[in-house]
Amino acid sequence: MSVDLSLYRLILDASLIVQLVMVILVVASVLSWLVILVKARTIKLANRASDDFEERFWSGVDLAHLYDGIRRKADMSGMEHVFSSGFKEFLRVRQQPVQVVDATHRSMRVAIAREGADMERYLQFLATVGSTSPYIGLFGTVWGIMHAFLGLSGAQQATLAMVAPGIAEALIATALGLFAAIPAVIAYNRFATDVDRLMGRLENFSDEFVALLARQSTARANGGSRE
């Protein structure tokens, strides 16, 4: 007796539960790859934007002029957002030198936290897919094998050909679980590292910018006192 063990036939002949598991894993894999592609592009653009802004910032440009050009942008994000938040707060409290450093630094920390939340968006989805997909696939495998052996309950003589399709369809669920999980885990670890590195850049810039404003405020106060 010949048995059709083609992938297409195995999926069509699988039990409803196993088919449902396969659909869930395929959808999870497609969504995770969509997140991977979008997040990779987002992080790449964020790093490029940070490089461009740092080059402008440290070129000696007037900070007020730089701020005026940035605050009109509708898509302000990343280091520009951190700078804009800090300089806006600096302009508000610059007549109170004692509060300049703390107020500016606090405003920039809030901006960094918001940027971090935006950059980490959907990473939890990748972590969930990576951690649960193997177990979902394993459930489909166990169910498929159980269904295959239950089909032998009324048979007079059990043969490998009778259980092979059921076992094969069950193993497809395991393969799909790994196919969904492995890229998600790799991407999550990579993106988490990239986001941490980017947040470190923003925090370093914040510290350097606050130190620069503190020096300017001190110089202005000393100059005013001499007058």
Image (cartoon, rainbow, N blue to C red):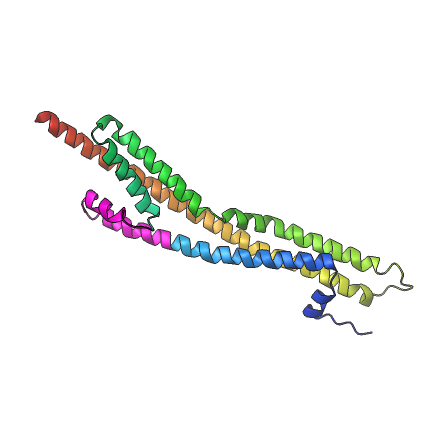
Tell me the residue at 16%/28% (across/down). 221
Seen from the viewer's position, the closer of residues 69 and 52 is 69
Q: Is residue 209 left or right of residue 203?
A: left
Q: Is residue 69 left or right of residue 43?
A: left
Quadrant of res 16: bottom right
Seen from the viewer's position, the closer of residues 174 and 42 is 42
Tell me the residue at 12%/28% (across/down). 224
- Residue 56: horizontal and vertical position, in percent? 23, 50
Chief secondary structure of the magenta portion: helix
- Residue 111: horizontal and vertical position, in percent? 36, 40
Tell me the residue at 28%/52% (across/down). 52
Tell me the residue at 46%/50% (across/down). 191
Which quarter shows the C terminus?
top left
Q: In the image, which residues are magenta?
A: 45-74
Q: Is residue 133 above or below residue 83?
A: below
Spot the residue most to the right. Answer: 156
Seen from the viewer's position, the closer of residues 132 and 157 is 132
